[in-house]
Image: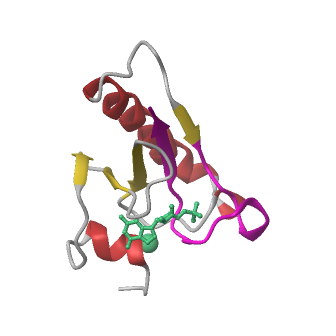
Amino acid sequence: MRDCVFCRIVARQSHADVEYEDDAVLAFKDIYPKAPVHVLIVPKRHIDSILTMERQDAELLGRCLLAARTVGEAKGFGERGYRLRVNCGPGGGQVVNHVHVHFLAG
Ligand code: 5GP
Ligand code: ZN
């Protein structure tokens, strides 16, 4: 397996506090939360970044957004709303090169 911290979490080789899982997506608490609710939503299949995503990745990234909706509803933010953020590449603040959506609320 590639040396990727989020792939290790997906493979359950590293611990994370999982908030949501389906066949394609895993969502877990950010280890250094920047908001009262800070969840990371990642595709189980490794994609580096929006910078290099391909047409074939579009549905999987859409699944991440649907998972964000599910997390939001489960945490009681389904009506109030929340912020989703995707850092893209070093200039966008992306540190972990496994694409992820930050779910920030509260
Ligand atoms: P980025 O800056 O790449 O968009 O965000 C990476 C996020 O991953 C950061 O908010 C950071 O706190 C989080 N993070 C990095 N390593 C780990 C880890 O091992 N476990 C968890 N749960 N979060 C991590
Ligand atoms: Zn990965």
Residue 3 position in % (x across, y down):
43, 87
Q: Which residue is drawn at 31% across and 23% down?
A: 73
Total numbered badges shown on the rendered structure: 0
Q: Nearer the viewer, residue 8 or 17?
A: 17
Q: Nearer the viewer, residue 76 or 40?
A: 76
Q: Residue 64 vs residue 96: left or right?
A: left
**Residues drawn in magenta:** 85-106
Q: Does the magenta stretch include residue 89?
A: yes
32 shown above or below 24: below
Image quarter hosting the N terminus: bottom left
16 shown above or below 100: below
Q: How is the image coloured?
A: secondary structure
Q: Which of 89 and 2 is in front in this view?
A: 89
Image quarter hosting the C terminus: top left
Residue 94 position in % (x across, y down):
64, 65
Residue 35 position in % (x across, y down):
48, 45
Residue 51 position in % (x across, y down):
71, 61
Ligand 2's quadrant is bottom left
Q: Residue at x 39, y 28 (%)?
A: 69
Residue projecting furthest to the right: 91
Q: Does the magenta stretch include residue 75?
A: no
Q: Hey, which quadrant is residue 28 in on the image?
A: bottom left
Residue projecting furthest to the top: 79
Q: Residue at x 39, y 48 (%)?
A: 39
Q: Residue at x 44, y 63 (%)?
A: 32
